[in-house]
Amino acid sequence: MSLELSNVTLTYPDGDGVVTALDRVSVRVAPGEVTAVVGPSGSGKSSLLAVAATLIRPDSGTVRVGGTDTLGLRPRETAELRLAEVGIVFQQPNLISSLTAVEQLVVTGHMRSRPVREARASAMETLAAVGLSGKEHRRPHQLSGGERQRVNIARALAGRPSALLVDEPTAALDHDRGARVMELVGEATRTFGVATLLVTHDTEHLGAAGRVLEMRDGRLGAPAPA
Ligand code: ADP
Ligand code: MG
C-alpha cells in the first residue's frame, strides 16, 4: 500500500499572519521504495513527515496511508490507523534503558493488542531482519550506536506498517555509520515492502534512495542540478 500526499498545504499561525510550511505538496511513495526529501533547515521537511504520519492535519489537500483517505477519519480512527499503518523513526533512538532489544519492540503500542508469545516471535523475526540475530536480549548500553539505530528501525517496523517515515537518520552518526544506516533503511524497505519517506539535510548518502526530491520554502520538486 502506498503513501500518497496530494496538494497538501499546511500553515502555522505567526503573529498576525501565517507561515506556510507546506505549499501544495504532492508526493506518492510506492511500497518497497525509498523516497528521500532533501532541503535546508526550515524548508518544511519535519512538517511533511508530521502530516504524512497523521500527527498534524493540513489546511487542505489529501493524505492517503495504506489506501485510506486519512483526513476523513475521526480523531480516534486516525490514532488507530497511525498505530496500524505508520512506523516512525526519529533521529534519536529514544530506547528505554532497562529493556532488552526484543522488549523495546514488544512494548510498542503496535503489538500491545497481540498475545505476548506472538508479539515476541514477531519481534525476534523483525530483529533478525535488521541484522540483530543473537543480540535480541541485550539492553541499549550493550549495543553499539549503529545497533541501537537498528533497534530503532526494527521498532518502527514491528507493527508491519505500510508507511515508514524517517527523520534525519544520519544526523548523529559519522560518515561510515551514516552510510550503513541508510543502506539498512533501503534493505528494510524492500524486505518489509513499506513505502518509505525519508527527510534529511545530508546529501551524502542518498544512494539507497530510489528517488530524491528537494524541498524549498515548503515547495517540493525535482532537485536543482548540482
Ligand atoms: P525543517 O524540518 O525542514 O527544518 P520544519 O517543517 O520544521 O522544517 O519548518 C518549516 C517552517 O515552519 C519553518 O519556517 C518553521 O519555522 C515553521 N514551523 C515549524 N513548526 C512550527 C510550529 N509548531 N509553529 C510555528 N511555526 C512552525
Ligand atoms: Mg526538521
Image (cartoon, grey):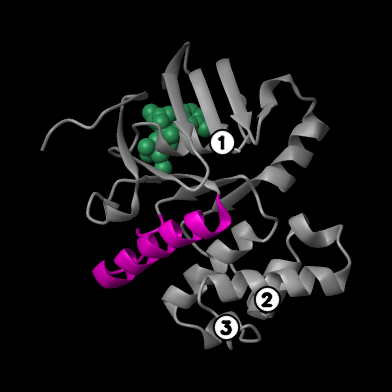
Q: Is residue 192 magenta?
A: yes
For marks 1 and 3, the one nearer the N-term is: 1
Beta carbon at label 2 within 8 Å of ligand 2: no
Question: Residue 207 location, x and y as percent?
Answer: 27, 54
Nearer to the camera, 82 or 13: 82
For marks 1 and 2, the one nearer the N-term is: 1
SS at mark 1?
loop
Asked if marks 1 and 2 touch (Cβ < 8 Å), the reply is no
Q: Is residue 180 magenta?
A: yes
Q: Residue at x 50, y 20 (%)?
A: 6
Residue type at mark 3?
Ser
Question: Residue 149 location, x and y as percent?
Answer: 48, 68
Residue hosting label 2: 124
Few, some or many residues within 10 Å of mark 1 (<14, 14–19, 20+): many
Residue hosting label 1: 2
Residue 59 visible at all: no
Question: Which quarter of the picture shows residue 103?
Answer: bottom right
Few, some or many residues within 10 Å of mark 3 (<14, 14–19, 20+): few
